[in-house]
Image (cartoon, rainbow, N blue to C red):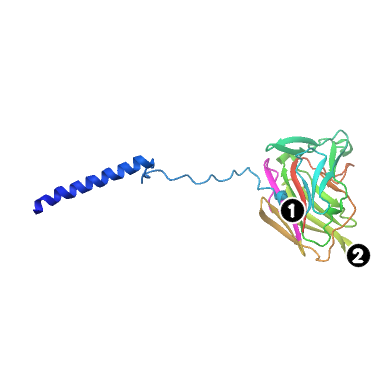
Amino acid sequence: MGFKRWPVIIAGLVLLAVVVTVAAVWLTGDEPESPSATPPSPPASPSPSAAAPSPSAQVTREGVVFDFADGLDRARVVGAAAGPLAVREESQTGGDVTLVPRDGDFAVRFPGPCANSDEKQCPRAILDAGADAALNPRLRAFRWGAAVLMAPAETSKGSNVLQKGYSQFGTQFKLQVDGVEGRPSCVLAGPQRGRNVIHVAQAARGVADGRWHTVECARDGSVLRISVDGVPQGTAAVPAELSIENDAPLRIGGKGVAPGNDQFHGTVDDLFVAIG
């Protein structure tokens, strides 16, 4: 065989390989990926207006969750006393708490700011969840918090999201959003050296911007922490021997319905207390 015939043979083999490849592609239905194809787009970044996932879903050992899925008058107790928890609305001067839609579920809205110079004439309303023993953490580590929605015009000197107990006597834990900036803070209070002392961990940023924000408080031993949308915002030292236990009711939206109740004026959802 002469060397002149080799190019013809090689060309024939190449043609045969191409035919075999095309046939295989046609039979299997697969298409080779084009090297010039546009790569898949990366996942979209979360919207800045979306609140961080609510930590209320993490209440798995003991505590209570208020997600308002079944209306205003029910909460879910987790732990040894698992079951529903009755919640009642209290109001004065025409105030009320209303259910509003949120993500296919419901949140609750409290009375708006009052322009009346006589606070006794202002609408006031809260939710009272009673004094269930599951809400007394004593010395155990625990967390409490909520998703909040406040407009810049809904801030006030004192806006209580939730509280159990009182700061002037006995013991207390509380979440509040105070001042023109709407800066949330976590509070623990109790007796220390013969008098009641209030311990406050305040966030460095406000939340009164018309968007949902998740605010969480956490007590672990001698440290009280606050976070907003999952980002740590501040800490405070508390006595490790401070036991939070009282027979006061857990109240949402204010400390009561009398004038000067530190009425919360925005919307809340997914409130929780998680112990252990």
In which quadrant will I find the C terminus? bottom right
Residue 213 position, x and y percent, is 68, 46
Q: Quadrant of residue 112?
A: top right
Element type where label 2 sits in the image: loop
Relative to 67, is 18 on the left or the right? Answer: left
Q: CA distance from mark 1 to mark 2?
A: 36 Å
Which region is colored magenta? 202-219
> Can residue 270 be seen by looking at this rendering?
yes
Residue sitting nearer the eye, 266 or 75: 75
The residue at which mark 2 appears reads as: 194
Residue at image point 80% right, 44% down: 75
Residue sitting nearer the eye, 263 or 89: 89
Q: Quadrant of residue 109?
A: top right
- Find residue 235 and name its label: none
Relative to 40, is 83 on the left or the right? Answer: right
Q: Residues at badges 1 and 2 in contact (C-beta under 8 Å)?
A: no
The residue at which mark 1 appears reads as: 60
Residue 81 position, x and y percent, is 84, 52
Q: Earlier in the sequence, mark 1 or mark 2?
A: 1
Residue sitting nearer the eye, 87 or 269: 87
> Can residue 178 be seen by looking at this rendering?
no
> What type is the residue that disc 2 sits on?
Gly
